[in-house]
Image (cartoon, rainbow, N blue to C red):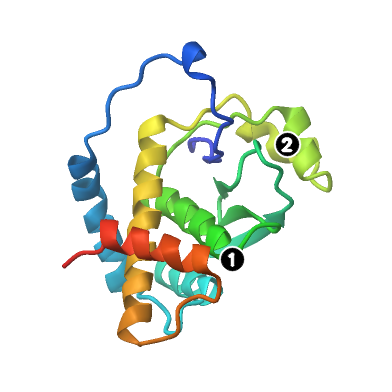
Amino acid sequence: MTAPAPWCVRLVPVPARHQEASAPVEWSELRARCRPRVDELLRTVGLPDPWDVDAFLDRLERARGRQIDLCAMAWTVGESTGGWQRRADHDIIVYPDNTTSLHQDHIILHEVGHLVSQHAGRCVLSLREAQRRAPSLRPAAFAHLLDRLTLEAEEHEAETIATMLLARIGRQLRRDRRPAPPDAPTAAALGRLTSTFDEP
């Protein structure tokens, strides 16, 4: 019997007074743990030039021998921003269709981080929320998603992998001397990511 497929979602933050204390994150250890996964991903898949998330996922599909279906959904502030589900013969990545392209890429790469790390996760979607988000799916499609919750450590790993990939993408853009993104906030965000996570 195979284990249930993971489905990652980001939770609405709980006010500090209601949170249990979590273990402090050792960021250098986290980066050291994630760097080989990013290096392997770049070695086997590479980054399309110019950067395009769809072309990247096409390469990832070929490298893994598994299809990846992207599913765009409307996003509301305070709700989960993305998700990943492993099916028997393909993967599904959910991302918001009503946010910036940089934010979409980051969310998709975060879910790729879960995928390449083979995270197990546990879902926090209730059947009602799952049906509201994807009304065209039968309730049975959600049966294996319920009563599972993604671990905090897995979220840190996936986020670190996404950020490291975005830093490599930023370095590629600089190397190719492509113009900076048109809006200043996006350019500033890429600059901060690159200076923080870029490897020498």
Residue identifier under label 2:
130
Mark 1 belongs to which amino acid? Answer: Ser
Residue identifier under label 1:
101
Q: Residue at x 56, y 32 (%)?
A: 11
Asked if residue 60 can be seen in this view, the reply is yes
Q: Secondary structure at mark 1?
A: helix
Question: In the figure, residue 37 lies in which quadrant?
Answer: bottom left
Q: Residues within 10 Å of mark 1 (few under 14, many from 20)?
A: few
The quadrant of the picture occupied by the C terminus is bottom left
Mark 2 belongs to which amino acid? Answer: Ala
Percent coordinates x, y for residue 125 in the rendering: 65, 31
The single residue placed furthest to the left in the displayed view is 200
Q: Residue at x 40, y 71 (%)?
A: 63
Q: Residue at x 59, y 47 (%)?
A: 82
Q: Earlier in the sequence, mark 1 or mark 2?
A: 1
Nearest to the observer: residue 199 or residue 43: 199
Percent coordinates x, y for residue 177 in the rendering: 36, 87
Question: In the figure, residue 91 lies in which quadrant?
Answer: bottom right
Q: Secondary structure at mark 2?
A: helix
